[in-house]
Amino acid sequence: MRARRLPGNLLAMPGETKRELAVIIPAKNEAGRIGRVIKAVLEAKLPTEVIVVSDGSTDGTGDVARTFPGVKVIELAVNQGKASAMNAGVKSTQARLVLFIDADLDGLRGTHLDQLALPLLTGECEMSVAIFRGGGKWSDAAMQVSPALSGQRAMRRELFEAVPNIERLGMGIEVALNQTAKRRRSRVVRIIFRGVSNAHKETKLGWMKGVAARTKMFVEITEAMVTNGQRRNPRDRKRKRGQWRGKR
């Protein structure tokens, strides 16, 4: 389905759209890619704050982020994993609404972020998740197989903070967020990001290191599924699959 058309004057909209929305970009060694992502974020109309969390980067990722006026940069001295980097970003802001974007995206535009944030700001959902379409064969295929693992999502702060043992999750954070949303009976919508893709690990790190990183990611995802799945409310089994609502 097509992404929803944005209202002409977003900043003049009443109610929830005036609430603070922090965009948090967790990044490890993304100096060559994060600049274009930050540019897109700064083009968006709805975010009120932009935070980059450099997770033990050694390539000057934080230095690149600091070249953009108004962007807050948090430097973690050692790599702590994606979930911990996201958590550090949330702790650094008072915003009640947070939006997470990966640092290695290609084709991202400001309108994509506004589309992702809008249903949250208008109270239509508690979490929105982006799905890539038409950005590249690799990214599209990955989204077809596991759309619920998308790292591009906006949510209410209390939903993020309800995830147990965040510091242990690593790349399993998206699974944990999905499971937490299900336990809380939160409303979730999917938003199509057309023309957006991400760099896969084998391209960024080389074949051997990329495969090792991908293996580590799947281990962390599996651990999150097992650990957080054990906390499921027994009544959830009686529910229909998914609080997920249709694509836009």
Image (spheres, grey):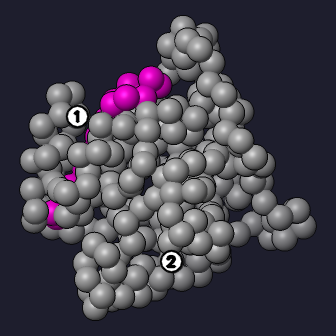
Please tell me which residue is depicted at 39% across the width and 72% down the height of the picture.
Answer: 200
Q: Is residue 208 visible?
A: yes
Position in image of residue 109 (x %, y %): 43, 38
Please tell me which residue is depicted at 51% across the width and 57% down the height of the picture.
Answer: 135
Q: Nearer the viewer, residue 146 or 172?
A: 146
Q: Secondary structure at mark 1?
A: loop
Q: Nearer the viewer, residue 32 or 118?
A: 32
Position in image of residue 175 (x %, y %): 57, 67
Q: Which residue is mark 1?
A: 71
Which numbered disc, 1 or 2, marks the residue closer to the eye?
A: 1
Position in image of residue 94 (x %, y %): 37, 31
Q: Is residue 36 magenta?
A: no
Q: Is residue 43 magenta?
A: yes
Above or below — where is 66 with respect to 193? above
Picture quadrant where residue 33 is located: bottom left
Q: Which residue is mark 2?
A: 221
Q: Point out the stretch of residues depicted in magenta.
A: 42-57
**Which residue in the rendered view is the most extreme toward the bottom?**
208
Disc 1 or 2, which lies upstream in sequence?
1
Q: Is residue 238 left or right of residue 173?
A: right
Q: Secondary structure at mark 2?
A: helix
**Residue density around tag 2, few if under 14, some if 14–19, many if 20 or more, within 10 Å:** many
Above or below — where is 229 with respect to 67? below
Above or below — where is 156 with respect to 88? above
- Type of the residue with mark 1: Val
Please tell me which residue is depicted at 64% across the width and 46% down the height of the picture.
Answer: 191
Give residue 23's mark: none
